[in-house]
Amino acid sequence: MQADDIDRRILRHLMAEPEAPVAQIAERAGLTAATCWRRLERMRAGGLLKGQEAVIDWRALGYEVEVSLRFTLDKTNPRAFDEFIAAARGVPEVIEIQTFLGRVDVRLDLVARDIAHYQEVYRDRILALPHIADIEALMHVAVLKADEGLPL
Amino acid sequence: MIALDDIDRAFLRALVEDATLSAGELGRRFGLSQPAAWRRLRRLTEAGAIRTRRVVVDREALGFSVTVFLGVKLATKGRVSLEDFERAVTAIPEVQTVQHILGIYDYRLRVVARDLPDFERVLRRRILTLPGVGQVDANVLLSEERRPGPLG
């Protein structure tokens, strides 16, 4: 399915305010509520609009520490990526797994209750992951923007 | 910080999949009355367990096929330069997320672009011209997977 300018406008307003009722999105986009609703349905049916996800605030749940671990893998083993990722899925503190083209091969986003808990997860679970050549840790201090909106 | 029981965790897992679920739907799914589900949902919301909602779209179909993560180091430091940088970087439409981090970089940015030439344009015209920007390292996202984390 192809999106036209009106679809893009609707998505732009929806992304800016995901909780707004359809009538409000319609008003912002300069459409009637019925037209806006029909277009949203069409975008859902066409797979353009997949839904909405809640983003958890791990700090509010008592996970004070968030760390990005950036891995370089030993690529001499052709199964390195698959085996590393399968093992990383088994670490309960991992909230995101990303693969890259660049200096970094894989990044894991990890949450922990405090620094002591992080140390424990890092030593017992992370260092035990297969095919690691190098690890860099980046500690998250603050999130300044996280809407993942698109410049539509 | 809020203490969670198994039903709270199940609620949050369900909302991560679909943030639009109502208290009634959550109650039916996990065997609670509508008022009981509503009270739980309100308690979770008031505790700030959900930071925001994210609209999930087919980025490729909307013409954004490239996502790049940038590690940015500031060349000059001090409170004023941090504020200038943060204000300018969060205003760039192609920059989807901005995280302040500790480690070999100061900030981590998620940048979306139509293709690699479009990314180059964003990098040269918008990122490398930011106030105080120093060394920048780029990794092109190949795949990403969000995990339930400690809610699982």
Image (cartoon, rainbow, N blue to C red):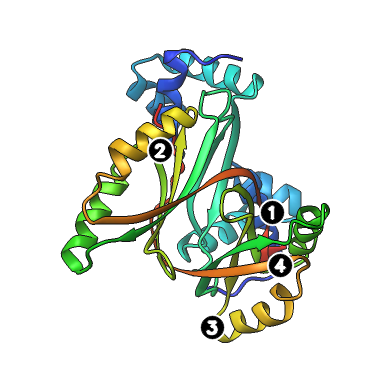
* Measured Cα–Cα span from mark 1 to mark 4: 49 Å
- The amino acid type, in three-letter code, at marker 3 is Ile
Front label number (2 vs 4): 4
- Residue that numbered label 4 is attached to: A132
Q: Residue at 32%, 38% (x, y): give it.
A: B124
The image position of residue A113, as x and y in percent, is 57, 78
Numbered label attached to residue B33: 1
- Residue that numbered label 2 is attached to: A17
The image position of residue B38, as x and y in percent, is 58, 54
* Measured Cα–Cα span from mark 2 to mark 4: 41 Å
- Residue that numbered label 3 is attached to: A115
Comparing A21 with B124, the one in front is: B124
- Are tags 2 and 4 found on a single chain? yes
Badge 1 vs badge 4, beta-carbon distance below 8 Å: no
- The amino acid type, in three-letter code, at marker 4 is Ile
Rendered position, A1 above or below B151:
above
Comparing A125 with A44, the one in front is: A125
